[in-house]
Image (cartoon, rainbow, N blue to C red):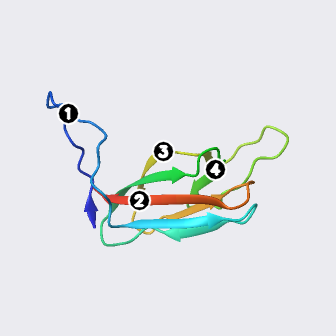
Amino acid sequence: MSKFNLTRDINGYNGFGLDFCEDNQSVTLAANVEQNFTVPGNYATWIAVFSYEPGASVWVANNFTATIPGGTLAATFSELNPTARRVKAGDVISLISPDDSVAVGVSLYAL
C-alpha cells in the first residue's frame, strides 16, 4: 500500500511528486470492450491516478459501466481521460476505448 504523500518543492510548497505506487492496475483495452476492477477495501478512501497511452481516448466511469459517446449530445457518467479522482473502497472503476490495443494504468494511493 502506498500512502498519498505529495512531495514538497525547494520552497516547501506541495508539488505533485508522488512516490512509486504499490497498488497498480493495468490493462490493454480492445476496441469497444469494457474492462473494470474493484477498489481494494483495506483503506476507506483512495486517489486513483490514471495513465494512458499517448493519443488514446479512454472513457472512465465510477460505479457505472463506462460508455463511448454516440453521434448526438447525451448525458453520461463517463469521463474522457481523467487524470486523478478520489474513490472509495468497493467502488468499481470501468474503462472503455473506441481505439484498439490501448494501454491504461491506474495507481491507487491510500488517503
Q: Nearer the viewer, mark 1 or mark 2?
A: 1
Disc 2 residue type (three-letter): Ser
Could you tell whether 86 is left or right of 69 in the image? Answer: left
Label 2, secondary structure: give it.
Answer: strand
Precedes in sequence: disc 4 or disc 1: 1
Label 1 with label 2: CB-CB less than 8 Å: no
Q: Which residue is mark 1?
A: 9
1, above or below 7, in the image = below
In-front residue for pair 22/87: 22
Query: How far apart are the two marked residues, 1 and 2, measured between alpha carbons?
Result: 22 Å
Could you tell whether 26 is left or right of 12 in the image? Answer: right
Query: How far apart are the two marked residues, 1 and 3, measured between alpha carbons?
Result: 21 Å
Precedes in sequence: disc 2 or disc 3: 3
Q: Quadrant of the N terminus?
A: bottom left
Label 1, secondary structure: give it.
Answer: loop
Identify which residue is drawn at 68% across, 47% down.
76
Q: Which residue is mark 2?
A: 107
Residue 98: % across, % down: 75, 54
